[in-house]
Image (tube, rainbow, N blue to C red):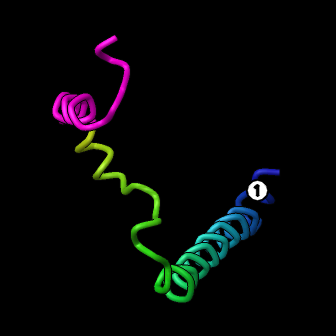
Amino acid sequence: MLIDNDCSDELKTRLSKLSEEENFEKKNWYLHNKKTMKYADKKKMPVDKTKVVDALRHSNVFKSKMVGELETYFNF
C-alpha cells in the first residue's frame, strides 16, 4: 500500500493539470488584452484598484467636492 502511494504518478498528474490550467488562463488573459482591450475606450473602463484606494484614502476631500459641486439635498 505504501509502495503504491509512493510510486504512483497521481501527484505529478495533479500538478501538471494545475500548471496546464494556469497557462491556459494566462494565454486567454493575454489574448483578451491584446485583441479586445487594445481597442476599448479607456473612458468607459471600470475604475482601477489604485484609484479606489486613493478615493478611500482622501474620502473627506471627495465628499466636500461632491457636496460643493453637485446639486444635492444635503442642505435640507
Q: In percent of the image, x 70 and y 59: which residue is there?
A: 6
- Tag 1 secondary structure: helix
Judging depth in this view, the residue of 3 and 12 nearest the camera is 12
9 vs 38: above or below:
above
Where residue 1 appears, as percent x and y from the top left, is: 83, 51
Q: In percent of the image, x 76 and y 64: which residue is there?
A: 10
Q: In percent of the image, x 56 and y 83: which residue is there?
A: 36
16 vs 67: above or below:
below
Residue 44 in the figure: left or right of residue 28: left
Residue 39 in the figure: left or right of residue 12: left
Where residue 51 appears, as percent x and y from the top left, is: 29, 51
Residue 58, by quadrant, is top left
Q: Which residues are magenta?
A: 56-76
Where residue 72 appears, as percent x and y from the top left, is: 36, 26
Q: Amino acid at mark 1?
A: Asn
The secondary structure making up most of the magenta span is helix
Judging depth in this view, the residue of 30 and 46 nearest the camera is 46
Q: In percent of the image, x 46 and y 64: which residue is there?
A: 45
Q: Is residue 17 inside the magenta stretch?
A: no
Residue 69 in the figure: left or right of residue 71: left
> Quick one: quadrant of the C terminus?
top left
5 vs 34: above or below:
above
Residue 59 in the figure: left or right of residue 46: left
Judging depth in this view, the residue of 3 and 17 nearest the camera is 17
Tag 1 residue: 5
